[in-house]
Image (cartoon, rainbow, N blue to C red):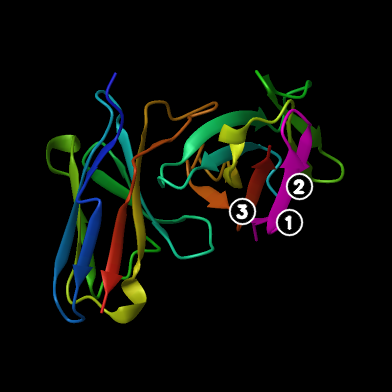
Amino acid sequence: EAGVVQSPRYKIIEKKQPVAFWCNPISGHNTLYWYRQNLGQGPELLIRYENEEAVDDSQLPKDRFSAERLKGVDSTLKIQPAELGDSAVYLCASSLDRTGKNEQFFGPGTRLTVL
Amino acid sequence: AQKITQTQPGMFVQEKEAVTLDCTYDTSDPSYGLFWYKQPSSGEMIFLIYQGSYDQQNATEGRYSLNFQKARKSANLVISASQLGDSAMYFCAMREAGYGGATNKLIFGTGTLLAVQP
């Protein structure tokens, strides 16, 4: 079974430029998460989707970040314009169940460097 | 507010020995779940073990076991018979039930970097 797929794996851009990350969750997983992981820290949730609905975006900086999950499958996270402080690893995860263990499966992440 | 604390920035262990990674948590919710994830240098978060707050027994998964002490709000990970491939960052995380059911939001600690020496 294929895991969570993310692209690109690495991205280097100059500040004020736009950037987009793509995530394809595990087939059949209804819940999709975007996390940001700063250097030396644990991941922090940016947004969570249940199917195509964003049910928790309280931590998403909405002035410059946007996300979409068309048809409740793959998802795109966008930053426009990027700032130096956005340099981080952006992790996508997916899960199937809403109760119980509800294990989240993570992708390899996209490492963003803003110069 | 919910919080996860990992006080060990780094740990060394000899190959084939056991090691305990500490995790304490803070929550006012009686229903929660505790997770441990491994993050090798490749960056992917790998699920290791889960403990529900109402589980009576400590969770075990192969060489991994979770020492759950509810009254002390600790959920330490024990890795037995360490292997070189165990060298990685280890994150403790908590999920609260929240209002109306599971929120599915994980709160992570800052991690512990484990180095297994031959």
Local secondary structure at mark 3: loop
B44 vs B115, nearest the viewer: B115
Q: Callout 3: residue from which chain?
A: B
Which of these two is toward me, A59 or A13? A13
Chain of residue at mark 2: B
Query: Residue A3: x, y in percent?
Result: 31, 29
- Cα distance in 3D space between marks 1 and 3: 8 Å
Q: Which residue is mark 3?
A: B111
Residue B58 in percent (x, y) is at 76, 24
SS for tag 2? loop
Whichever of labels 2 and 1 marks the residue nearer the N terminus, that label is: 1
Whether residue B19 appears in magenta in the rendering, the answer is yes
**C-beta proximity under 8 Å, tags 2 and 1:** yes
- Magenta extent: B1-21
Horizontal arrangement in the rendering, residue A1 relative to residue B17 (left or right): left
- To which residue does mark 1 refer? B8
Q: Gap in Å between the C-alphas at discs 2 and 3? A: 10 Å
Q: Where residue B96 sits in the image (x, y, percent)?
A: 59, 44
